[in-house]
Image (cartoon, helix red, strand yellow):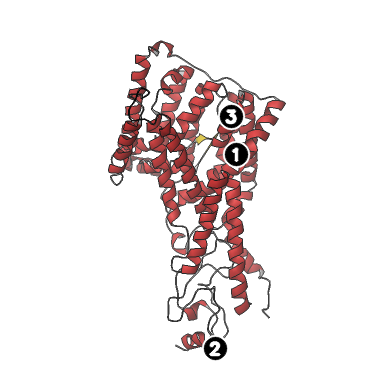
């Protein structure tokens, strides 16, 4: 019978200190983003990326922003002036703090429920305040630090892949709003012809990263919106001048209704997509860059604890927005500064009257931009395992990724997708742990694997009975595994042949 031994204190400490989202080769990469106090370094980096492509990338997330902004404003749940002003202010703030295009986007789950239930401005503010207060608390107490220590990489990649599919679906729905090629109901500025043309254009320049395709599509959409506004004689409703924000303090009843109806459903989405998946994606897109989840939760809390009291819609970060801006060319905070200034100017100068023009912006363009930005988010899921040379472990990791993504899409709930993914990862961990512990009961929490090694170095030496210091497989979700590359090597899912071990130990 296998002998079960408890881990030593040193093993437990080493395990908790180990990051589960990076392979050994990624640890020593230099940080490409200078800290916010290194103004010369930041300026040098922005100068290197001062291109049209960088400014084009700033528009990569408007596919989610514009439809939600228009809908909530028309309903009276949010102020267009406040949402544009504070959205721009938060763009500038996050750009300065993080140094990468860390997007600022609406809380989509709250927005969907607010539109369905016709929330008042106070109820929308109550939902945003409740969620941001909890997220801020979890961040400042560093409870989310445990995520990188216990959540396996395939679960995070599954969340990103599931979010990709959901955003792709929303992009298609935007295109389908005016999905006609001909007929009496066709709108000359918004139809499937323009959707197809913009889609082909994005694909043609997909590998030509210097082409500012997002800016081209956006400017064409603005031209169409202005033309439609003029054709319907609505320019008289657009008033330029000084517009100011107004306080919107929710009552106790509005806070309770907003938080219980919409805030609770938004909470897992914010924690998993706006914090966990976002931090993992930033590491993927900018190798060597390691954003702090404490800082991410802190900025989410500040954005809403201030903005929601002044009529702004609830904002958060998001992996989809970062992927979209990156896909269309954004690489530095310069894109966020550009977008932030535009939002502030439009909000202060035109205010609520800007809605007259925005509602004519072609949804076909927004849908295509959202769809292609979502594809960029899904691409990062291809690196779903830290064990590229172990076929059995990669198969298990892929199953975890598929379960997480499928559950997220099927239930339309990030929390359920995360839960099912973690359960799947735990079952596979128990399988590996019991099999390996039956053969070598002394191992419970070995150190990180850094690459492939031969079988004799990966397991117990038949002559000395010693354990290797590194290169062992893991017995916990998210830890790195190693495959034997020498003759007779096997994955840890099967017990080793003592004669093979002895033969290699004797070499």
Residue to which mark 1 is pinned: 266
Going 39% across and 42% down the picture, which residue do you hit? 372
Residue to which mark 3 is pinned: 116
Kindly report which numbered mark, 2 or 1, lies closer to the viewer in this rendering.
Answer: 1
Q: Which mark is residue 463?
A: 2
Residue 42: x and y in percent read 40, 42
When the figure is inspected, residue 370 is found, relative to residue 282, above or below; the finding is above
The residue nearer to you, when weighing 201 against 28, is: 201
The residue nearer to you, when weighing 506 against 180, is: 180
Q: Earlier in the sequence, mark 2 or mark 1?
A: 1
Residue 207: x and y in percent read 29, 47
- Looking at the image, the residue that sits furthest to the front is 183
Going 63% across and 32% down the picture, which residue do you hit? 127
The residue nearer to you, when weighing 362 against 88, is: 362
Residues at marks 2 and 1 touching, judged by CB atoms closer than 8 Å = no
Residue 323: x and y in percent read 43, 44
Q: CA distance from mark 1 to mark 3?
A: 15 Å
Kindly report which numbered mark, 1 or 3, lies closer to the viewer in this rendering.
Answer: 3
| Left or right: 90 as drawn, with respect to 188 | right
The residue nearer to you, when weighing 452 against 199, is: 199
Residue 133: x and y in percent read 64, 37
Going 51% across and 52% down the picture, which residue do you hit? 158
Other-residue count near label 1 (Cα within 10 Å), few / some / many at <14 / 14–19 / ≥20:
many
């Amino acid at each position: 019978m296998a002998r079960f031994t408890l881990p030593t204190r040193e093993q437990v400490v080493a395990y908790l200190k180990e990051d589960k989202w990076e392979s050994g080769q990624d640890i020593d990469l230099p940080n490409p983003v200078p800290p916010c106090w290194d103004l010369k370094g930041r300026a040098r980096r922005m100068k290197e990326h001062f291109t049209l492509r960088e400014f084009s990338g700033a528009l990569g997330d408007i596919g989610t922003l514009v439809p939600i902004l228009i809908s909530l404003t028309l309903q009276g749940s949010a102020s267009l002036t406040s949402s544009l002003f504070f959205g721009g202010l938060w763009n500038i703030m996050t750009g300065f703090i993080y140094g990468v295009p860390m997007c600022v986007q609406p809380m989509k789950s709250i927005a969907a429920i607010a539109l369905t239930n016709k929330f008042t401005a106070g109820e929308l503010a109550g939902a945003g305040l409740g969620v941001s207060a909890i997220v801020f608390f979890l961040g400042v107490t560093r409870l989310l630090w445990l995520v990188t220590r216990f959540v396996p990489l395939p679960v995070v990649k599954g969340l990103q892949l599931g979010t990709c599919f959901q955003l792709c679906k929303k992009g298609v729905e935007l295109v389908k709003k005016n999905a006609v090629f001909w007929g009496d109901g066709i709108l000359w500025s918004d139809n499937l012809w323009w959707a197809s043309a913009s889609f082909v254009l994005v694909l043609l320049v997909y590998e030509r990263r210097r082409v500012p395709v997002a800016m081209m599509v956006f400017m064409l959409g603005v031209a169409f919106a202005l033309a439609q506004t003029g054709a319907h004689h609505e320019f008289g409703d657009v008033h330029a001048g000084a517009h100011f924000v107004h306080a919107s303090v929710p009552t106790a009843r509005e806070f309770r209704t907003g938080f219980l109806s919409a805030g609770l459903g938004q909470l897992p989405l914010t924690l998993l997509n706006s914090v966990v998946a976002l931090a993992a994606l930033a590491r993927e897109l900018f190798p060597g860059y390691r954003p702090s989840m404490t800082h991410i939760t802190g900025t989410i809390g500040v954005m809403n604890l201030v903005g929601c009291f002044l009529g702004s819609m609830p904002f958060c970060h998001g992996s989809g927005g970062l992927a979209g801006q990156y896909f269309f060319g954004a690489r530095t905070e310069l894109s966020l500064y550009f977008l932030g200034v535009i939002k502030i100017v439009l909000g202060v100068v035109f205010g609520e009257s800007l809605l007259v023009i925005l509602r004519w912006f072609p949804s076909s363009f927004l849908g295509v931009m959202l769809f292609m930005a979502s594809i960029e988010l899904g691409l990062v899921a291809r690196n779903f395992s830290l064990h590229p040379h172990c076929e059995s472990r990669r198969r298990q990791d892929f199953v975890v990724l598929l379960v997480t993504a499928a559950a997220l899409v099927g239930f339309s709930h990030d929390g359920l997708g995360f839960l099912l993914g973690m359960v799947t990862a735990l079952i596979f961990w128990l399988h590996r742990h019991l099999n390996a512990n039956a053969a070598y009961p002394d191992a419970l929490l070995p150190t990180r694997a850094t690459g492939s090694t031969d079988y004799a170095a990966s397991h117990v030496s038949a002559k000395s009975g010693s354990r290797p210091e590194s290169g062992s497989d893991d017995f916990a979700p998210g830890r790195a595994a190693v495959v034997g590359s020498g003759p007779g090597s096997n994955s840890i899912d099967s017990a080793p042949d003592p004669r093979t071990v002895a033969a290699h130990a004797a070499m």
